[in-house]
Amino acid sequence: MSLLQLHNVSRRFGALKALTDISIEVQPGELRAVIGPNGAGKTTLFNLISGFFPPSEGQITFDGRPIQTVNPGELVKRGIIRTFQITEIFRSLTVYENLRIAVEVAQGVNLRPWMGRALRKRIDDQVDELMHLVKISGKADRVTGEMSHGDQRVVEVGIALARRPKLLLLDEPTAGMGDEETHHMTALIRDLNKNQGIATLFVEHDMEIVFGIADRITVLDNGTLLAEGTADEIANNARVQAAYLGQAA
Ligand SMILES: Nc1ncnc2c1ncn2[C@@H]1O[C@H](COP(=O)(O)OP(=O)(O)OP(=O)(O)O)[C@@H](O)[C@H]1O
């Protein structure tokens, strides 16, 4: 069964058709890139999947249940977790503190005035595990606001993982990063997908990254689904070359 299914989904803003008749299926454990020229509808697609607004038409199914009218908070509980282009961290807190809050919130224990030793140990272990997963243990005591943009985004991914996502939505995960940071983030996305089996959809403008790590690629153009397939299929697709890659070259 597909993890996520969009069936004939459209979204209009007044007279503007941001997405038209989109049908997509994402399998569990898949790493998929969503690409397309500016204004193609990538962000609108993410907004629909994460419940920021409903489709004008069509159905969206996640984990076998319709979600097109489910609100973002409930979708987070069901396992759809999204990170944004703008980092969402507590800048005055350390890496450890940020991740600890994320774990406590995810566990529903953040407002407890007192925590038993066993629970505290479990939370501590999860924070350690998260830092290990995103490979930031060595910077646990750094104040996040003073870290590089790349490191901040890594912390943000850690925060997202605290929710134990079934589907991770990454909005331009390497935007604004230098070469080394880009390499680190790209390796992290691939490792999380391969080792943790987290299905991941990411919007990315850097074609080297897209073609380097994605299992499948969805190409949007002007609100329509232009093509979908493996990296090889997309690279050899004449319509994609004409509409997008040719333009980018
Ligand atoms: N909330 C909104 N209200 C009105 N129009 C919108 C809204 N969100 C998106 N649009 C329009 O929908 C179209 C698709 O926009 P969208 O942001 O989804 O494209 P995109 O592929 O993410 O572009 P970019 O790569 O530039 O971020 C654009 O014409 C945009 O102006």
Image (spheres, rainbow, N blue to C red):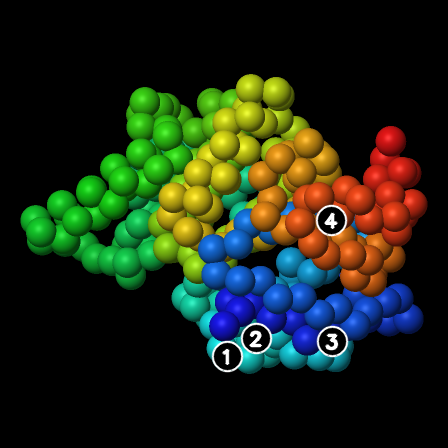
Q: Mark 4 or mark 2: name the one nearer the start of the chain.
A: 2
Please name whichever residue, 179 or 103, is drawn nearer the observer in this view of the structure: 179
Nearest the camera: 158 or 143? 158
Look at label 1 and name its amino acid. Arg
10 Å neighbourhood of mark 4: few (<14), some, or many (≥20)?
Answer: some
* Of the image marks 3 and 2, the number of the one nearer the N terminus: 3
Dot 3 amino acid type: Asn
Residue 108 appears in the figure: yes
Q: Secondary structure at mark 3?
A: strand
Quadrant of the rendering where the C terminus is positioned = top right
The answer to whether the residues at label 4 and label 1 have Cβ atoms under 8 Å apart is no
Q: Amino acid at mark 4?
A: Glu
- Residue annotated with mark 3: 8
Q: Secondary structure at mark 2?
A: strand
Nearer to us of marks 4 and 1 is 4
Q: Alpha-carbon distance for marks 4 and 2?
A: 26 Å
* Horizontal side, residue 73 vs residue 174: left or right: left
Tell me how far mark 1 sits from mark 3, CA to CA. 16 Å
Q: Nearer the viewer, residue 152 or 231?
A: 231
Q: What residue is shown with label 2? A: 61
Residue at 68% x, 44% y: name it: 231
| First-in-chain label (3 vs 4) | 3
Neighbour tally class for label 3: few under 14, some 14-19, many 20 plus, Cα within 10 Å: some
Q: Position of residue 202 (x, y in %)?
A: 61, 48
Asked if labels 1 and 2 touch by Cβ distance under 8 angstroms, the answer is yes
Quadrant of res 130: top left
Locate residue 139, reporting x and y percent: 35, 24
Image disc number at residue 65: 1
Kind of residue indicated by mark 2: Thr
